[in-house]
Image (tube, rainbow, N blue to C red):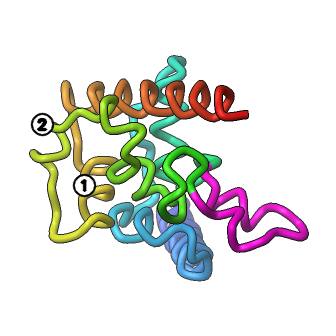
Amino acid sequence: MSRTELRNKVREIDKRFWINEMEQLKTLEIYRKYKKEIKEVRIYDNRISSKWLFRARSNSLKVNQRSYFLKKGHKEEDKICGLCNKEEESLEHFILKCKDLGGKRNKELIKKYKGRNGKETVGLLLFKTKGEDLESIKEMLNNMWVTREKLLELKG
């Protein structure tokens, strides 16, 4: 087997392993739908806003729904949004629904990438934005996260 054939075979095995791992993790539903291949994306830099984009894309923002699964002895009410107290604080709730963060949302950007439902809108915002829109989503996520943390601190 040539080096090229061997390299291609290893990539094929890696891709199958990667897909299998993603399919087993319920939390990667949006990521799985929009990230179809293993490849480097050059959308991150050293700014904190890139960190929030990465965490949102990988569904690892520490919103209450995510934190609930990481805690031992958790209760159902631990998933509720600590700001609005209306529903589970999921990624979708954080980005699109929480009334307390409404003023920090880029409504034009959300309208531009609106999908058939909330999950699709979140997926399009996180995975289909490019250029100036990508920078806008990073800034929006950063502003929302900072506001969330400040409001939660004020609520005690």
The x and y percentages for residue 143 are: 43, 25
7 displayed left or right of 139:
right
Please name the residue shown 51% across and 70% down the image.
15
Local packing at callout 1 (Cα closer than 10 Å; few below 14, some 14-19, many 20+) is some
Stretch of the chain drawn in magenta: 63-80
The x and y percentages for residue 153 are: 68, 28
Please name the residue shown 48% across and 47% down the image.
56
147 above or below 125? above
The x and y percentages for residue 51 are: 54, 32
Residue 108's tag is: 2
Tell me if residue 76 is in the magenta stretch.
yes
Tell me if residue 97 is in the magenta stretch.
no
Please name the residue shown 70% across and 73% down the image.
76
Labels 2, 1: front one:
2
35 displayed left or right of 26:
left
Q: Earlier in the sequence, mark 2 or mark 1?
A: 2
Whether residue 2 is visible here, answered yes or no, is: no
Q: Main secondary structure of the magenta part?
A: helix
Name the foreground residue: 13 vs 66.
66
- Quadrant of the drawing holding the C terminus: top right
Residue type at numbered disc 2 = Glu
Name the foreground residue: 11 vs 30.
30
Residue beneath disc 1: 124
Q: CA distance from mark 2 to mark 1?
A: 14 Å
CB contact under 8 Å: marks 2 and 1 = no
Element assignment for label 2: helix
Local packing at callout 2 (Cα closer than 10 Å; few below 14, some 14-19, many 20+) is few
Name the foreground residue: 83 vs 20.
83
- Quadrant of the drawing holding the N terminus: bottom right
Whether residue 95 is visible here, answered yes or no, is: yes
